[in-house]
Amino acid sequence: MAAQEGHLECIRTLLEAKADVQQRRNDYATALHGAVRNKQHEAARVLLEAGADVEERSETYDTTLLLAVFSGHMPSVRLLLAYKADVEAENSQGEFPFSVAVHNGDLACIDVLATSKANISRAVAASGMTGLHVAVLRNSSDVLYELLELRYVLACVFACVSWVR
């Protein structure tokens, strides 16, 4: 409760009293899930510094990075990536951070995840659709342009690496 409300002094007091940073609620969510879900970036930082597991899963198998991308909260996305959150982890619906960012049309998340080596060509298992498919179906020209630009840049990088060898 303290984490999801961003009560930093309460969090610190609980941690000093040796509270379990990985304690789960009935829905299997940890304090870190609550902080990220409610865009409490500083609370998430305190929990991560105290050893909270960035890869812990909720009842629906959501990681904290997935929750941050769902909410489009870039400070939390960047923080979790700094703590080496898995950019390819998927939840029980087969969603993964990049697919969620594309579905939400979140260009900032798309760019940060691609920079963090997310597989931009990966398809969602249930639908078989890649980000390009989703962008076309949603008539999202901004996302489509961003994805095509990323693919072009990556293709150029790979071509340069091959040429140097």
Image (cartoon, rainbow, N blue to C red):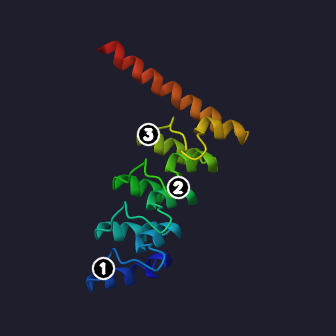
**Image side of residue 87 versus residue 21, left or right:** right
Q: Earlier in the sequence, mark 2 or mark 3?
A: 2
Dividing the image into 4 quarters, which one contains the C terminus?
A: top left
Residue under circle 2?
69
Numbered circles on residues, count: 3
- Kindly identify the amino acid type of the residue bearing the numbered disc 1: Asp
Residue under circle 3?
115
Say which residue appears at 34% left-offset and 52% top-offset: 84
Residue 120, relative to residue 74: is it above or below? above
Q: Quick one: SS at disc 2?
A: helix
**Image side of residue 50 versus residue 73, left or right:** left
**Disc 2 packing (10 Å; few <14; some 14–19; many ≥20):** many
- Kindly identify the amino acid type of the residue bearing the numbered disc 2: Val
Give the image location of residue 64, x and y in percent.
44, 62
Of the numbered discs in the image, which one, if any, rests on residue 79? none
Residue 20, relative to residue 118: is it above or below? below
Q: In front: mark 2 or mark 3?
A: 2
**Image side of residue 87 versus residue 100, left or right:** left
Q: Nearer the viewer, residue 52 or 24?
A: 24
- Kindly identify the amino acid type of the residue bearing the numbered disc 3: Thr
Q: In front: mark 1 or mark 3?
A: 1
Badge 2 vs badge 3, beta-carbon distance below 8 Å: no
Give the image location of residue 79, x and y in percent.
40, 57
Query: Hey, which quadrant is residue 138 in on the image?
Result: top right
Q: Quick one: SS at disc 1?
A: loop
Q: Earlier in the sequence, mark 1 or mark 2?
A: 1
Residue under circle 1?
20
Badge 1 vs badge 3, beta-carbon distance below 8 Å: no
**Disc 3 packing (10 Å; few <14; some 14–19; many ≥20):** few
